[in-house]
Image: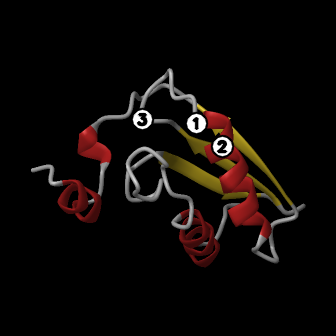
Amino acid sequence: MAISEDMKESILGALENVIDPELGIDIVNLGLVYDVDLNDEGLATITMTLTSMGCPLGPVIVDQVKTALSELPEVKDSEVNIVWQPAWSKDMMSRYAKMALGIR
């Protein structure tokens, strides 16, 4: 069963509380979250990337994602898959994130 749009919005809303420590902008507006899913058992699967492969804050961000998701009653457990394809670029950022960081 596919995740409902409402649930997807709830998950993305929770993930907007996860701030990239280097850039000070949340991971959703940065375009780091590629996919979110929730199965019938309440396992949320987040497919995301980091701004750089050598990002030392990866484990911190993964912990923050799990903490943010644990606040949703529908989410019983979560799994975060860090992927490097497609590679992240500034083009994936929302208009808000670009304005906040002064990127045109």
Which residue was labeled with disc 1? 57
Q: How is the image coloured?
A: secondary structure
Residue 37 quadrant: bottom right
For the residue carrying disc 3, how many other residues have a C-alpha within 10 Å: few (<14), some (14-19), or many (20+)?
Answer: some
Q: What's the distance in space between the residues labelled 3 and 1, CA to CA?
A: 10 Å
Please state if 2 lies on the left or on the right of 29 as rendered: right
Task: Name the residue rendered at 90%, 61% in the picture.
Answer: 41
The secondary element bearing badge 3 is classed as loop
Which of the pair 88/102 is nearer the observer?
102
- Residue 23 drawn at (x, y percent): 38, 48
Q: Quadrant of the N terminus?
A: bottom right
Amino acid type for the residue under numbered disc 3: Thr
Q: Earlier in the sequence, mark 3 or mark 1?
A: 3
Q: Are marks 2 and 3 in contact (CB under 8 Å)?
A: no
Q: Indicate the amino acid at tag 2.
A: Val
- CA–CA distance in space, label 2 to label 3: 14 Å
Disc 1 residue type (three-letter):
Leu
Residue 95 occupies quadrant: bottom left
Residue 83 in the image: state x and y as whole percent: 56, 29
Within 10 Å of disc 1 (Cα), the crowding (few <14, some 14-19, many 20+) is some
Cα separation between marks 1 and 2: 5 Å
Which numbered marker is on residue 51? 3
Task: Name the mark on residue 60.
Answer: 2
Residues packed near mark 2 inside 10 Å, few (<14), some (14 to 19) or many (20 plus): few
